[in-house]
Amino acid sequence: MKINLDRTIAPDSYPVEDFVLLKPEIFSTRNQCKVFSLKNASQPILHFSIVIKGGKLVEEKQGAAALTSKMMGEGVKGMTSAQIHEYLDSFGAIISVSNDIDSFTITGHCLNRYFEPVMEMVKRYLTEPTFSEKEFQHILQVMIQQKILSEEKTSFLATKLFREKFYGNKHPYGSSLTSAELSEFPLQELENYFNNHVIGAPFEVFISGDVDDKHIKIIDEQLGDLNISSEAANLIYPDFVSKIASDELKIYQEKEDAVQTSLRIGCPTFKLPHDDLEAFSVMNETLGGYFGSRLMRNIREDKGLSYGIHSSFRNEINQGYFLIASDVKKDLKDLAIDEIRKEIDVLATEVVSQEELLTVKNYMAGSFVMSINSNISLLEITKGLYKKGLPFDYYDNYVSRIQSITEQDIMAMVNKYLKGDLLEIAVG
């Protein structure tokens, strides 16, 4: 039977409604570290993250956390980097290590039947690492070349300068190494960092996928006997930055060979949890958070000053800032900045139409639903909620909270946060 479709008629659509996300079961290892388990047996695969407290906040020498994370897995007692990777490849498994402001994370993926040997290797990462000078020099040269290339890009320089001026270059959230400083970095600092701030530091384990009791038991067998230092749990976070560190709020750094200028414009916001989170999120989306935003329509579509412009906000622990980022035509940077400020002023003084607000809120609800598409995404959502101090049922009525935001709420957020001092960085 042939069915004729009239493609000029849009299919029926329905609003997104609240729904309940999978919550973790919580266990404890013998050394009193928490395990958050998200069981979803749709595929015989496990995804895990071991989040060790510390990161950049605890390093005695700047850059030690990042370089130590690069060296983890590049050798353990009796095995070279190549042998480790060959061993993991035999199970179709992946282990990677990264660092953040306040954490050092080992992440892995494997078939559930191979979880035990993979976790045995994770334990070796944590108890038997070797810091080979040869491997270190190889990694160092790769990082130096990447840094040199980045230091030629106006986008990298603008973001770096924004963080330095926003926080101050002595602040742990605002400082970073140059390629020249990397080239003189001593290997011994990595061993010191590992011994003082990785092994023995408290951790949490997040695991998702086809998890059962035997996998929780394996985690305890491999990690539960690690000696945890109570002193290492006391991270000292910097005070909340409510005032931009730089006395100069408009900074232009010229780069003669640049064909474009990178703009970074931002201000302090709030730390989480906070009652303004949903209203600020909708305001940000309206201003510059998605492709149909006001900044995109003005700067890209109407004026043709840039390929793209985006606004966002980030919340570290005890920190929060808002940022507008764009790369614009070099000779038209002043016009772009004027138009950005104009859009902020309009949003602060004129009520958003119900049609525009409904579009934004529907986009946010739809994007949220689409982002939950795997066990990995569930794991990352759970990690994020835990780190930010938000309850695990935060998203159960997220759609309703977003839909409840009004036109007046949008205006209030702009006036409360964006009408004060804005740090304005231009590099190019």
Image (spheres, grey):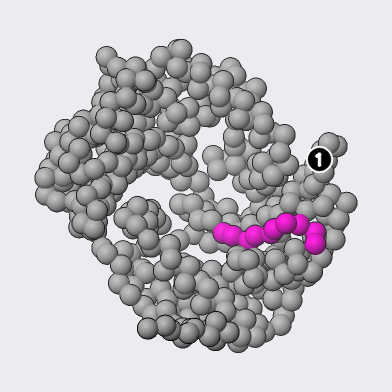
Compared to residue 202, the image places residue 310 above or below, namely below
Where residue 68 sits, quadrant-wise, is top left
Q: Is residue 308 magenta?
A: yes
In front: 135, or 283? 135
What residue is drawn where x is 19% and y is 51%? 211
In front: 206, or 3? 3
List x then y, in percent, for residue 249. 75, 52
Q: Is residue 212 magenta?
A: no
Residue 408 in view, yes or no: no
Q: Amino acid at mark 1?
A: Ala
Compared to residue 65, the image places residue 247 above or below, namely below
What residue is drawn where x is 20% and y is 32%? 117
Q: In this figure, which residue is indicated by the disc labeled 1?
A: 258
Left or right of 205 on screen, residue 30: left
List x then y, in percent, for residue 351. 67, 84
What residue is drawn where x is 67% and y is 31%? 149
Where residue 24 sits, quadrant-wise, is bottom left
List x then y, in percent, for residue 209. 25, 52
What residue is drawn where x is 25% and y is 48%? 45
Compared to residue 40, the image places residue 258 above or below, namely above
Q: Residues within 10 Å of mark 1 (few under 14, many from 20)?
A: some
Tell me the quadrant of the picture where the N terminus can be found. Answer: bottom left
Q: Read off the magenta span.
A: 304-313
Q: Secondary structure at mark 1?
A: loop
Report the predominant secondary structure element of the magenta stretch. Answer: strand
